[in-house]
Amino acid sequence: MTDARKQQGEKLTEAEAIERAKQGDAAAFKVLYDLHKRRVYSLCLRMTQNTASAEDLTQEAFLQLFRKIGTFRGESAFSTWLHRMSVNVVLMQLRKKNLPIVPIDDTLEGDEEGTVKKEPGAPDERLTGAIDRLRLQNAVDSLPPGYRTIFVLHDVEGYEHNEIAEMVGCSIGNSKSQLHKARLKLRELLKADRAEKARK
Amino acid sequence: MNCPEFERDLPECVEGVPSPEQQAHLNSCPTCSGLLLDLNSIASQAQMLSAADEPSAAVWNALEERLWSEGLIRSAPAYLPAEVKPSFMQRWRAAWLVPVAAALAVVAVVKLYHPANVGDKNPVATQSQPQAQAPAPAQSARLKHKPALSHEDQQWLSTVSSRPPAQLAKFRSDLDQANAFIEDAQQSLQEDPNDVYMQQMLMNAYEQKQMLYELVVDDSSH
Amino acid sequence: MSTAKCAAKFVTVLTLAGVAFAAGDARKDLHFKVGKHPAISINNPYGPVVVKAGAPHEVVINAILHSDKVEIDQSQSHNRIDIISHLLQGADQYSGVVEYQVLVPADASLSIHSENGPVHAENLHGDVALEGGNGAMEVLDCGDGHVHVKTLNGPVTISNVRNGHVEVVSMSGDVSLNSVSGPYVAVNSNTGKIEYAGDFGGEGEYSFTSYTGNIEAVAPAYASIDVTARSSQGRVDSDFSLEPKHTPFYAKAGSYFSGTLGKAASSVKLMSFSGKIHLKKRQ
């Protein structure tokens, strides 16, 4: 693409931006940043629950990416590479702060956080209707940190259990178990939220 | 298969296809089928949350600065407009500082030429709180450095030069504190012009300095 | 006026004043008739000024002058009264002292400028504007109006002010707010401490900022606030477990916390450049 065309405002493709960024082109960095900032930031925000931390971690993730962009050969999708880097940055931060990433023991019986509570004889009502994004967001924010990490990585960001297990340092079984408990907990939270809304 | 057995195998059911046994139970149990539908719904709707939020512009500003400082950016953008969009500080100075500085200058000039009509003044003491003869050590200690005095500041100090030394020292200490606040806030804003909190802090710093000018000069005129 | 009424008034004035006459002191009593919402202004370089709510439609001023080197200039223009302690040649911080005890209608607007003396305003519902240098400033049991306090170095105490618009600016005077609530409460301090004890009620906007002064706010567990705290170089702490919130604003550097309690009815911003910030839970 010639400079003249660019001056007309045509956007770079991701591949073109990557090559230009390797040459140190400022605008190319901006293009890559704009393409992926929302996903990286949302991940950081979901995991840390804090906008200031999320913005710091977003900056750090992109900085690490851009430092290494010269080594990117295109073997995998750029977004996958960036995303994995972001997850590592966030997990490192959580570890630094000694915050729980995943509960170690997923075999606790009667774990109140995960089991479906049912009154004897009472029907378990369905979560009817569409799930509101904001309510789901609030419910995810209310999850215990360990459940939230697995839920965000799997259901929100699309990682497989084997990838999650490798990233967070747990077993695949643990990852599956925590995910299940997270979804059950979310169901409870969303139902409670709906019930409160109906009362008002 | 009963409900507890189904719930035990539920994780696999959600992620994959129910077995014939599980499907048979689902067909006959509205509670378990409702639960499965809800969990599937949550899992599928979760993708709404991906890329749902946007970081503030300051993230890129800070990142860009780091990229420059680490030498990762080696050339200015080839196809962006040549003129640089004025930074926040430049716009802020033009839009805000001029009226603020003008207001301060007006106050200083008006009070500067107001005739004083009070006789000799001795070191001031409050009715119930004797004043220290020197600036409070705690305040001086807090200041990392004394900001330089502007021309307006020097003129302002000259309007109160007839005050007792201890009082003058107190005024000077207050002025240094006010200027230090302004300087620190300005410096922070230069590093991050989009920091809305620091913008508020700078306005507060100017408000304090204006109060200092007004109160001290008001006292001089009586 | 009957003798009995005069005596009662004199006793009342003495009780309110509670001052002792020293040799050389001179008393001056002033009495003004005013209409609704009068405006009273007092400028007193040295000496205390105490203002309380009295009868409607009259302003009563009892002043004790500590020497003949100070005189009181008074003027009334319709509903506006101006009182100035005029220092004469040779006056100093002792001889220039005038002590004021003032009764005003509760709906009066009050403006007091005192370089060195303490100022106390109580039970008023009009606008109150106090300016001082080193003396303590106190506002008590006022509400519904604007309360503006400016001080260089004297401490400021505002207690039991409801439904008010409160603004305080201080250089090094410590500012203490107790049971203060309203649509707008703002404190801007340089090195003075800011202390707040109250419920942040009134669905108001609360803003406490300082350069280096520490900020401490004590709120009950039932407080309903949307709070943001940030210190660029100091520490911030919260005793509350805040509900996280998603905000486009952020703090790039320094310590920071942000979240909501209850229904987040009031907005609370605690900001300092290098002071410590602590949001405490009332025990």
Image (cartoon, grey):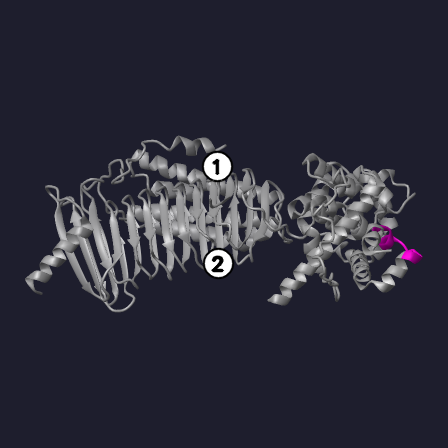
> Which dot marks residue B156?
none
> x, y (%) of residue A185?
72, 52
Q: Position of residue B106 (x, y in %)?
A: 40, 53
Q: Residue A189: in sight, yes or no?
A: yes
What residue span does the magenta drawing correspond to?
B11-21
Q: Is residue B12 magenta?
A: yes
- Chain on which label 1 sits: B
> Which quadrant of the figure has residue C256?
top right
Q: Nearer the viewer, residue C46 or C165?
A: C165
Disc 2 versus disc 1: nearer the observer: 2
Q: Is residue A5 magenta?
A: no
Residue type marked 2:
Gly
Magenta highlight: main SS:
helix
- Dot 1, crowdedness within 10 Å: few (<14), some or many (≥20)? some
Residue C211: x and y in percent read 48, 42
Q: How many marks?
A: 2
Which picture quadrant has residue C165? bottom left
Secondary-structure class at tag 1: loop
Same chain assignment for discs 2 and 1: no
Q: At 78% across and 43% down in the image, what residue appears?
A: A87
The kind of residue tagged 1 is: Pro
C237 relative position to A86: left or right: left
In front of the other: C12 or B133: C12
Tell me the subunit letter for badge 2: C
Label 1 sits on residue? B147
Category of crowding for the residue at label 2, using alpha-carbon neighbours closer than 10 angstroms: few (below 14), some (14–19), many (at least 20)? many
The image shows residue C55 at horizontal and vertical percentages of 22, 63
User: Is B158 situated left or right of C29 in this image?
Assistant: right
